[in-house]
Image (tube, helix red, strand yellow):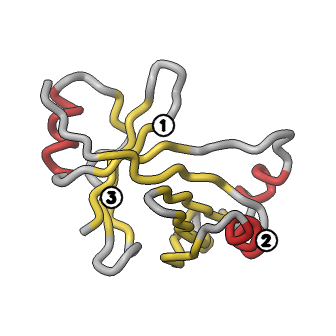
Amino acid sequence: MNLKINHLQHVGIPVTDIESSEKFYQRLGFENVMTSTFAHEGGEGRVMMMQHGTIIVELYQMPEPTLTEIRNRANGKIDHIAFDVDDIDETFATLKANGFRVVEEAPVYLGFWKNGCKYINILGPNDERLEFCQIL
């Protein structure tokens, strides 16, 4: 299998108060380079991409009731690790053909960044999520 991965794209972290988290990461030298919303189970979530040099941390706040579940966690949790790819459709086909547990039926479009992005997730042996993302 020849899967082209460019670099670690971002690490996704669910947060309970996105403004507070934004201020925290700004104190560490991160800058908010993208803010958007997303639909989830009839509600609207919020997302921010915080960048420091080449490091990007995705902060996202889920709508209720999922937000309550995040608030009730005893410890913080990194939700996923995302890898940058040039061609999400080719990556999707390669992963499916090689028997990886792909979560989505097809690449998913989000209106993030200037022209949007498409992503897919696979599950690792411990159900960890690895995201493959193409910024369009």
Question: At which x and y percent is residue 86?
Answer: 18, 54
Element marked by disc 2: helix
Q: Earlier in the sequence, mark 3 or mark 2?
A: 2
| Position of 34 relative to 21 (above/below) | below
Residue at 33% over, 46% down: 7
Which residue in the protein does label 3 denote? 108
| Position of 31 relative to 92 (above/below) | below
| Label 1 crowd (10 A; few <14 / some 14-19 / many >=20) | some
Quarter of the image with the N terminus is top left
Quarter of the image with the C terminus is bottom left
The kind of residue tagged 2 is Ser
Residue 88 horizontal side relative to residue 133, left or right: left
Which residue in the protein does label 1 denote? 129
Q: Which mark is residue 79?
A: none
Measure how far apart labels 1 and 2 are at the Cα level.
26 Å
Residue 46 horizontal side relative to residue 130, left or right: right
